Structure formats: structure tokens, C-alpha cells
Image (cartoon, rainbow, N blue to C red):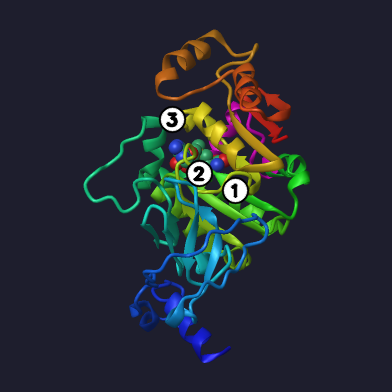
């Protein structure tokens, strides 16, 4: 390691909770006030560029898989490359076009439109806000999720196996686990070694904190190419056509707008990329009338859709090869970007 890269390494790993206390006192990376050239990005290969930075030559600058949630231009990263927890946490990101910076806190990088706002607070529908509660985030993998089995969910291990089958065409690529919750599937995807990197993405800060708590407990996952990102599924911080696989477990019924979300997922998928989702159906032919009534009444709070509606949404966004498996209220569906 040269002196310059060793200095950069020390700067970039400042404040990481896994590092010794003293290193946390180091300043976070600062952006130089220069304009960078534009360049294209591929999901599986993060492109290193060498802009003329004069005195800044010792710093790592690269085209980024993360894009600005405002203009979708690839962000500029200052910090170590890679999509692992340490590298992303130790980096600062900036959109040169919007002149907006995005930083990591609590081990996730906040790429929501509201990141860094001081006065405006956005309140999403109850079905989204519920999961921002620290209590719900804590309970989620400690009993809450297991209860889904009563609705026909086969259970985490089986759901993971089923999803892996659908994701075969995306092996070796970048997988984004949108609405990852506490990261139960993100950890499995990362540990499987099937993908070049996994991004665990959720809107809830507390879910992402829980994600980190679970990741810390498993050294293999801690070292994997797994990054934590806060973002809204309706405004994904990735360039169009840059993602190989999108997983959304038990999430569609929690999204503020399933149509915006599926359109956005379609946008970020590359040609041939695969989308796999699971959710509770509004009802199936065997759903008791009392439950149908309850689910219709609750439509304002939770967007339970029918199997036909989900297929309609996917195909109207241009996704093809739609297929699904249904068990009681559980549906796993898959579709591909042509
Ligand atoms: C029921 S949990 C599913 C967690 C996990 N994927 C699973 O399979 O159990 C739904 C998740 O959707 C997330 N969510 C709700 N609205 C969202 C939005 N607009 N953007 C991204 N995630 C959202 C919630 O924060 C929550 O973690």
C-alpha cells in the first residue's frame, strides 16, 4: 500500500463502529470543488475513472452504481470502492448535476429525496410508516414475520429457495432486495455467493438498523458484498438498466403506490433482468367471506391486490414471462425485463 492510499484508507474508514475508537474521530471525506467527466455505468463492473484532479489525485473517484434520486445521474463517490458495508459506510456520495451530497449514517447510505432536509418532514401512508417504528423493526424477525405462515407463506427458507430458482438468469449479477425489512432475505442472498453484490434497500431507518444488527452477528455476511441503502421504492437510486435482479419479499402491499414501484423496478432492471416479489393476495377463491370483507375495508391502509391486478401491473409496465405460485393468500410472482 502506498503512503497516499494508506492515508486515504485511514480517512475513509473513519467513524466506522467496527474500527477502533480513535479512528472514528477522523473527518469524513470531503468533495473537491471540481467538475467530473460523465461516464456510463454497468451494474456488475464499477468503472474507475481518473479525472484531472490536480492535488486530489490520491483520492478514489469512480462511476457509481448509485444514482441521484433527483436526476438519476450516477453519483460520484469519494471513498473506497466496492459494495460492502465498510466501503459504502466510509464513502461520501455527491451528484454533481444537482450539487447535492449524500452521506452514510448508522451504516446505511440515505438516498431518499428527503435526505439531509432540515425543515421538511415527509409522512408516508400508514402501511409504510408502521415499519419505521423501532418496536416493529425489533419485533419483525422475532415473531412478526413468522406469523405470515398462517396466511400461506411457506417460510423464509422455502421462499428463498423458490426465489433463487427464478433468479437463475441473473446469477453473478447485482441483486437489489427492495423493502428488505430487517434483511432476512438480503443476508441469505449475500451468503449464497450467487450474486456479485447485494443491496439491502428499505425506506425504514429502523429496519436498516436492525439489518445491521443481524449482519454484525454473522462474520460471513459482514464480509460479503452487501450494502445497506435507504430509499423509496418509487424513486430507486440506480441508473436505468443497471440492475440484474430485484427481490421484493412481502412488500407490495406496504408500498404507497404499487404501480409507481413496479414501473421504477422495471426502469432499473437491465434487459433480461428478473423481478421476483411476494405479497398477500386480497383474496383467493377459497378466502372466507369474512376475511374478504376485512381486506376490502382495509384497502385504504394496506393495498392487498388480486392475482390478476399484480399480473396486469407487471405486464402494463412492459415486463414479460410473468409467472406465479399461489398458496392460500400467498403469491410469489416473477417477471422479466425484455
Ligand atoms: C412486511 S415488510 C417485508 C420485509 C421483508 N422483505 C420480508 O420479506 O419479510 C415490508 C417492508 O416494506 C418497506 N416499505 C414500505 N414502504 C416502502 C417504500 N415506499 N419504499 C421502500 N420500502 C418500503 C417497509 O419499511 C418494510 O420494511
Choose the circle earlier in sequence order: 1 or 2.
1
Q: Foreground residue, 180 or 263?
A: 263
Q: Is residue 64 magenta?
A: no
Give me the residue at 45% from left, 41% from top: 232
Question: Mainly helix, strand or loop, the magenta region?
Answer: helix
Assess mark 2: CB under 8 A from ligand 1? no
Front in this rendered view, residue 161 or 107: 107
Judge left or right: residue 77 versus residue 197.
Answer: left
Q: Which residue is mark 3?
A: 256
| Residue at the spot 27% in from the left edge and 42% down from the top edge | 121
Q: Quadrant of the C terminus?
A: top right
Q: Secondary structure at mark 1?
A: strand
Give the x, y percent position of residue 3: 51, 91
- Return the residue at label 2: 236
Residue assigned mark 1? 176
Q: For disc 3, does the CB lie below 8 Å from ligand 1?
A: yes
Cα distance between the residues tagged 1 and 2: 10 Å
In the foreground, 174 or 130: 174
Q: Residue at x 70, y 40 (%)?
A: 274
- For the record, the magenta segment spans 143-159
Question: Could you tell me which quadrant the N terminus lies in?
Answer: bottom right
Residue 19 can be seen in this image: no
| x and y, in percent, of residue 82 in the image | 58, 66
SS state under label 2: loop
Amino acid at each position: 500500500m502506498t503512503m497516499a492510499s494508506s492515508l486515504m484508507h485511514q480517512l475513509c474508514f473513519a467513524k466506522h463502529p467496527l474500527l477502533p475508537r480513535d479512528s472514528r474521530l477522523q473527518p469524513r471525506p470531503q468533495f473537491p470543488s471540481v467538475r467530473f467527466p460523465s461516464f456510463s455505468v454497468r451494474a456488475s463492473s464499477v468503472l474507475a475513472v481518473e479525472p484531472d484532479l490536480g492535488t486530489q489525485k490520491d483520492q478514489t473517484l469512480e462511476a457509481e452504481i448509485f444514482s441521484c434520486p433527483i436526476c438519476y445521474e450516477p453519483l460520484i463517490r469519494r471513498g473506497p470502492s466496492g459494495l460492502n458495508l465498510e466501503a459504502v459506510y466510509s464513502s461520501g456520495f455527491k451528484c454533481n448535476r444537482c450539487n447535492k451530497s449524500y452521506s452514510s449514517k448508522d451504516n446505511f447510505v440515505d438516498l431518499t429525496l428527503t435526505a439531509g432536509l432540515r425543515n421538511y418532514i415527509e409522512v408516508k401512508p400508514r402501511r409504510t410508516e408502521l415499519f419505521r417504528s423501532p418496536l416493529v423493526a425489533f419485533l419483525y424477525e422475532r415473531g412478526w414475520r413468522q406469523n405470515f405462515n398462517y396466511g400461506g407463506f411457506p417460510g423464509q427458507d422455502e421462499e428463498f429457495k423458490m426465489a433463487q430458482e427464478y433468479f437463475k438468469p441473473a446469477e453473478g449479477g447485482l441483486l437489489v432486495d427492495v423493502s428488505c425489512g430487517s434483511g432476512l432475505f438480503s443476508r441469505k442472498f449475500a451468503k449464497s455467493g450467487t450474486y456479485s453484490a447485494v443491496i439491502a434497500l428499505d425506506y425504514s431507518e429502523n429496519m436498516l438498523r436492525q439489518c445491521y444488527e443481524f449482519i454484525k452477528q454473522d462474520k460471513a455476511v459482514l464480509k460479503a458484498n452487501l450494502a445497506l441503502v435507504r430509499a423509496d421504492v418509487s424513486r430507486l437510486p440506480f441508473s436505468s438498466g443497471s440492475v440484474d435482479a430485484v427481490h421484493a419479499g412481502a412488500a407490495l402491499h406496504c408500498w404507497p403506490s404499487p404501480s409507481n414501484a413496479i414501473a421504477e423496478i422495471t426502469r432499473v432492471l437491465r434487459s433480461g433482468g428478473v423481478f421476483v416479489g411476494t405479497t398477500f393476495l386480497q383474496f383467493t377463491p377459497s378466502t372466507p367471506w369474512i376475511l374478504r370483507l376485512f381486506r376490502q375495508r382495509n384497502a385504504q391502509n394496506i393495498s392487498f391486490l388480486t392475482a390478476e391486478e399484480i399480473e396486469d401491473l407487471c405486464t402494463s409496465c412492459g415486463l414479460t414471462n410473468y409467472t406465479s405460485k399461489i398458496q392460500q393468500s400467498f403469491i410469489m410472482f416473477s417477471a422479466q425485463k425484455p
